[in-house]
Amino acid sequence: MSAVTDTFVRTLHTADLTPGLRGAIRRLLDGAFAGHADGDFTDADWDHTLGGLHTLVLEGDEPIGHSAVVQRRLLHGGRALRAGYVEAVAVRADRRRRGHGATVMAAAERIIRGSYDLGALGSSDEATGFYAARGWQVWAGRTSALTPGGILPTPDVDGWIHVLPVAAIDLGGELTCDWRDGDVW
């Protein structure tokens, strides 16, 4: 654990979250995304958050900041790339603008650079500048999803998918995500 002012930062796998901490994270995310322009935080969004590494900014036992990195397969240039996909980046409304978002993203980026071919995330309008300032790049090519019915274009997310290349990658090529329920990206 490392101290950040009056808070602590922890990174834990989903398997290591106690039921109480898991519930507190869900409440944080529900509150952070309530009334959001892209919609509330759904059960499918929660499902996408689980199964990877969670970085938490804690005040005592209470999470006030969160990010998760989960493994996904992204197809690009004839290869299946191991991607660290960032989910559920949030800071409690009354604790924003204090560097907590940067703290959880720095941990996510360290995990990605050490374990994956690239990082990826879907951004909201409000967060694009935040991610760009951290070196994330907008995917310039087409996007698609590998669905049970085959590869289907996802033009509605073109311009919203950001990547953190770990190795050289053609940002203008096609990027295809693996299938999942809810929002595929």
Image (spheres, helix red, strand yellow):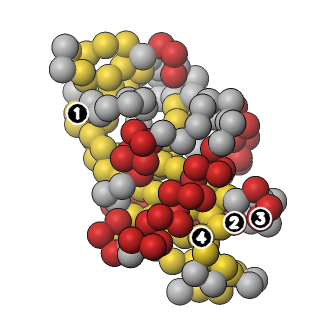
Q: What residue type is labelled 4?
A: Pro
Location of mark 4 (residue): 63
Q: Residues within 10 Å of mark 3 (few under 14, many from 20)?
A: few
Q: How crowded is mark 1: few (under 14 residues within 10 Å), some or many (20 or more)?
A: few
Location of mark 2 (residue): 100
The numbered dot on residue 95 is: 3
The numbered dot on residue 14 is: none
Q: Do the residues labelled 3 and 4 touch (CB within 8 Å)?
A: no
- Disc nearest the viewer among 2 and 1: 2
Q: Which of marks 4 and 2 is nearer the N terminus?
A: 4
Give the side of residue 147 with respect to residue 138, left or right.
Answer: left
Q: Which of marks 2 and 1 is nearer the N terminus?
A: 1
Location of mark 1 (residue): 79
Q: Are marks 3 and 2 in contact (CB under 8 Å)?
A: yes
Distance CA(mark 4)–CA(mark 2):
11 Å
Give the side of residue 104 with respect to residue 6, left or right.
Answer: left
The answer to whether residue 79 is seen in the rendering is: yes
Distance CA(mark 2)–CA(mark 1):
35 Å
Q: Do the residues labelled 1 and 4 touch (CB within 8 Å)?
A: no
Q: How crowded is mark 4: few (under 14 residues within 10 Å), some or many (20 or more)?
A: many
Distance CA(mark 3)–CA(mark 2):
8 Å
Q: Do the residues labelled 4 and 2 touch (CB within 8 Å)?
A: no
What kind of element bears circle 1? strand
What kind of element bears circle 3? helix
Q: Where is residue 15 in the image (x, y as percent from the top left)?
A: 29, 69
